[in-house]
Image (tube, rainbow, N blue to C red):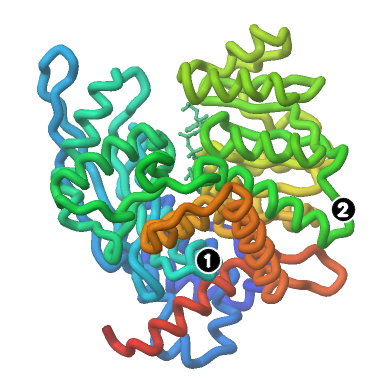
Amino acid sequence: MADTFPLSPDCSRFKKEIDCLMEAVIERNPGETEFHQAVHEVADTLLPFIDAHKKYKDALILERMTEPDRIIIFRVTWLDDDGNYRFNRAWRVQFNNAIGPYKGGMRFHPSVNQSILKFLGFEQVFKNSLTGLPMGGAKGGANFDPKGKSEHEVMRFCQSLMIELHRHIGEDVDVPAGDIGVGEREISFLFGMYKRLQNHFTGTLTGKGLSFGGSLVRKEATGYGAAYFLENMLRHADEGLKGKTAVVSGSGNVSLYCIQKLIQDGAKVVAASDSGGTVYDKDGIDEEKFEFLRALKEVRRGRIHEYAERFGCEFREGESPWSIPCDLAVPCATQNELDLAAAKELVKNGVMAVAEGANMPCTTEAVHFLQKKDVLFGPGKAANAGGVTVSGLEQSQNSLRVSWSREEVDRRLQDIMQDIHCQCVEYGERKGKPVDYRKGANIAGFVRVAEAMLAYGAV
Ligand code: NDP
């Protein structure tokens, strides 16, 4: 077996079953290490549960869930501003539609490959199930780097990508959204082309602009949702956000709005980052500094060191924020950005809770260490489900031809994040120990999909 991952204490007696499952997954998906990691993370907490529920075991539900329904791979050819031909590879991984049409973001980043999209699609199945909304799981993207491209180049790329993608998606089939490198600008280019090709105005993409079917609070939803989930975890442990020091990684869509909500709810956020490094603002990011950061990243598409220059605080080039003392850590940038060494540093500095704003930002070793040290750990499937939640609400508004107010959407988001927290507690509560949110999220997300798959029989 190429990859080896540690097992949680609860799962050590299932080592043989996990090894067997992982061997088959690795054999079918050679070299896809991120995907192996995501499957292992789920198996590590699910196998004892499945063992106790023979119906899931006999129908090979988990094994079948590790195989995507289909993967569409295609070339995207486009012209750059100098008239040169360029091409990239794009994918849509339609993972599982047992409980609703496929749903999941599109990622544009040079690191994108099939393994990363499969790990994201697999996670999305569980996450979407947790929201209680009728959404299956999918993910897509391209190894295209929007950084440094002109507006027209990004537009031409999006339009060319949609010329292929449009025949595989639809409001009742598959509803893509944003992710790394895909924000409102890209969704608008994609949707404009989709609408033109289909001659249909439907809610087939989410994250749209407000004037053409977008939902209020969608932009803020993942970050706000992560802050709400963190707040729920703290409240359950008789704690709160007020007065806590937080570090957040990244400064993109998820990070920005997580920072904003944490500040609004009384925490002091002292760090943010991008792939160039970390800013450490000991005084905390206040509302005015936040507005500067938001304009820097959303409007000017600038680099985070400009924040340090503007406010005279420390910039740690090439570093992540995990060595900065904090009570709360919220990784919101990318997968595997917080490793065992970083987890040890956080624990040494007294971290109380870690909530994953990004997808799988903590390595397996880091998660096990944090849980061993009784740090409250909110896995991405639960903690960052706010984005897809409001995407689901955007779909509902589009179908009903209505637009809910900001307050209405935010209230529904808060209710669903609270419900996800409750589901995690239901399946993850432990005597004398913090809730095992990882186990809770995996089991709760699994059950709904598994019941639907059982009902369908062998299809
Ligand atoms: P953005 O593109 O808006 O922002 C990503 C941020 O992370 C940027 O600050 C970027 O810095 C940084 N980053 C990306 N890759 C790396 C890297 N390899 N090393 C260091 N920093 C990096 O993406 P989002 O905020 O939308 O997504 C962030 C995470 O949240 C992803 O894991 C995504 O899957 C997850 N997520 C997003 C949702 C959404 O609604 N957008 C929903 C649920 C999860 P730089 O600009 O320098 O590259």
| Residue at the extreme front of the image, as rendered | 402
> Which of the 4 image quadrants contains residue 212?
top left
Q: Is residue 125 above or below residue 57?
A: above
Tell me if residue 43 can be seen.
Answer: no
Q: Report helix, strand or loop for mark 1.
A: helix
The kind of residue on which mark 2 rests is Glu
Residue 239 tag number = 2
Q: Residue at x 16, y 44 (%)?
A: 196
Q: Report helix, strand or loop for mark 2.
A: loop
Residue 411 tag number = none
Badge 2 density bin: few <14, some 14–19, many ≥20, Cα 10 Å: few
Q: Residue at x 55, y 89 (%)?
A: 53
Q: Residue at x 55, y 58 (%)?
A: 381
Which percent across, then down, holds residue 106? 35, 45
The kind of residue on which mark 1 rests is Val
Q: Nearer the viewer, mark 2 or mark 1?
A: 2
> Which of the 4 image quadrants contains residue 263?
top right
Q: Is residue 164 above or below residue 4?
A: above
For label 1, the residue is 42
User: Which quadrant does the N terminus fall into?
Assistant: bottom left
